[in-house]
Image: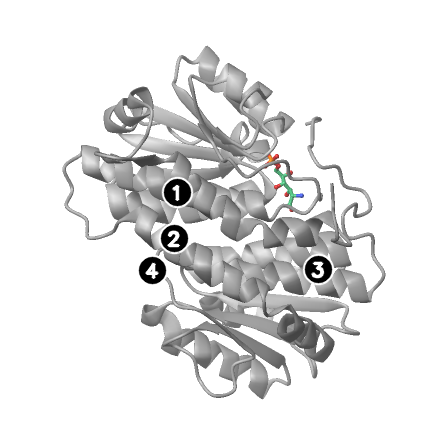
């Protein structure tokens, strides 16, 4: 039930701190630190390459998951859009492990890949919010998101939950491999949870960003580098899906290879700046679009922020920034849709779970 909330989406955005806390609680082990199914741990140790298969928002979480698993556990990862996998099937490694990421666990595109790779005899792990779902039942192993039912078509808390669980899986694998990390995911996720809580108290500021940058626009670009690029893609999906504003996420460095031709007087460009190593270059991209008339809105992270940034999110570990930087983007999409009188929870032409290929 929505309770006092006008929309499920807003309620689900606000639930994110509690979901992260729940995940921390569910995956905590008194003695070992992380509690994880031993068979999953072994599957991660046995594989020479992980193939993440997902669609939409879950695919965007997978892109972040690749960074986490490669950086922390040093296992190579490929991320594939489920509906494309069969046509563009890569040369598989000797010991692949398939990870299906799906909020609903019912996405037909992902299921068809699961059927295919099971016929080939490969192991599969499903990360889902619905443990009894098709993708969960038909895979060898399941990791539960513990996010509670997600009703709004636009996925919010499932995305943050997916990244949190992928971070835990990555660290667990690193530990099992004997890699020395000075990164306690449960402690870092607790910091993330408080940061999201602080962001959820700043809704008026985000609504003001929407009024200033998006009120009458027909299009909007999101730019970022590294992990921020992936979050920009998710921000664009959220915005287009519920407000019908044409939105795309681009890598900052790709702008000058074509996209910059679309920048006109007043075009909104939302830039993410949460990564120290690319802070200078993403801000240079912002200068390039501003010089062509763009209405640039910088969302940065504490410690990397500059005077005219539109919004600053609290600092968290650099690998976990998507968990906080996505929150203003979710809220931007929400208020943009609200200001346009769109049906926030049930956008046109879309279903919550896509059970046809
Ligand atoms: O249930 P799934 O995570 O497998 O769903 C995948 C996509 O259909 C889903 O994430 C979709 O992109 C959302 N509506 C985006 O907000």
Mark-to-mark CA distance, 1 and 3: 27 Å
Q: Is residue 251 visible?
A: no
| Spatial CA span between label 1 and label 2 | 7 Å
Task: Give the CA distance from mark 3 to mark 4.
Answer: 26 Å
User: Is the C terminus in the top left, top right, bottom left or bottom right quadrant?
Assistant: top right
Looking at the rendered image, the disc whose residue lies closer to the viewer, 2 or 4, is 2
Q: Is mark 2 within 8 Å of ligand 1?
A: no
Q: Is residue 186 left or right of residue 248?
A: left
- Quarter where residue 238 is shown: bottom right
Residue 161, horizontal then vertical, whole percent:
49, 43
Give residue 190's mark. Answer: 2
Residue 315 in the figure: left or right of residue 232: left
Q: In the rendering, which numbered label is found on residue 24? A: 1
User: To which residue does mark 4 refer?
Assistant: 317
Vertical arrangement, residue 240 with respect to residue 141, above or below:
below
The answer to whether mark 1 and mark 2 are in CB contact below 8 A is yes
Where does label 3 land, which residue?
Answer: 334
SS class of the residue under badge 4?
loop
Q: Residues within 10 Å of mark 2 (few under 14, many from 20)?
A: some
* Label 3 or label 4, whichever comes before in sequence order: 4
């Amino acid at each position: 039930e929505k309770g006092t909330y006008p929309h499920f989406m807003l309620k689900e955005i606000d639930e994110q701190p509690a979901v992260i806390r729940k995940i921390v609680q569910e995956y905590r082990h008194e003695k070992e630190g992380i509690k994880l199914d031993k068979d999953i741990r072994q599957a991660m140790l046995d594989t020479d390459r992980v193939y993440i298969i997902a669609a939409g928002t879950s695919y965007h979480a997978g892109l972040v998951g690749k960074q986490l698993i490669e950086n922390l556990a040093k296992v190579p990862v490929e991320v594939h859009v489920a509906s494309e996998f069969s046509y563009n099937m890569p040369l598989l490694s000797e010991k692949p492990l398939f990870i299906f990421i799906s909020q609903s666990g019912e996405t037909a595109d992902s299921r068809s890949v699961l059927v295919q790779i099971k016929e080939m005899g490969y192991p599969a792990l499903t990360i889902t919010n619905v443990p009894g779902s098709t993708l969960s039942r038909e895979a060898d192993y399941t990791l539960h998101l513990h996010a509670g039912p997600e009703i709004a078509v636009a996925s919010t808390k499932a995305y943050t939950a997916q990244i949190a669980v992928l971070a835990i899986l990555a660290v667990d694998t690193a530990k099992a491999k004997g890699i020395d990390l000075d990164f306690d995911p449960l402690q870092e996720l607790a910091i993330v949870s408080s940061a999201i809580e602080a962001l959820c108290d700043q809704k008026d500021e985000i609504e003001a960003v929407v009024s200033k940058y998006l009120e009458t626009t027909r299009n909007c670009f999101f730019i970022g580098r590294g992990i921020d690029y992936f979050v920009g893609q998710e921000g664009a999906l959220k915005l287009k899906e519920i407000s019908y504003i044409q939105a795309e996420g681009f890598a900052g460095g790709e702008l000058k290879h074509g996209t910059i031709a679309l920048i006109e007087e007043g075009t909104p460009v939302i830039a993410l700046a949460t990564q120290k190593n690319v802070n200078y270059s993403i801000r240079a991209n912002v200068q390039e679009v501003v010089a062509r008339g763009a209405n640039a809105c910088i969302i940065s992270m504490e410690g990397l922020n500059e005077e005219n940034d539109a919004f600053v999110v609290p600092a968290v570990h650099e690998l976990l920034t998507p968990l906080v930087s996505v929150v203003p983007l979710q809220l931007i999409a929400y208020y943009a849709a609200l200001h346009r009188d769109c049906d926030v929870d049930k956008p046109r032409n879309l279903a919550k779970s896509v059970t046809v290929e």
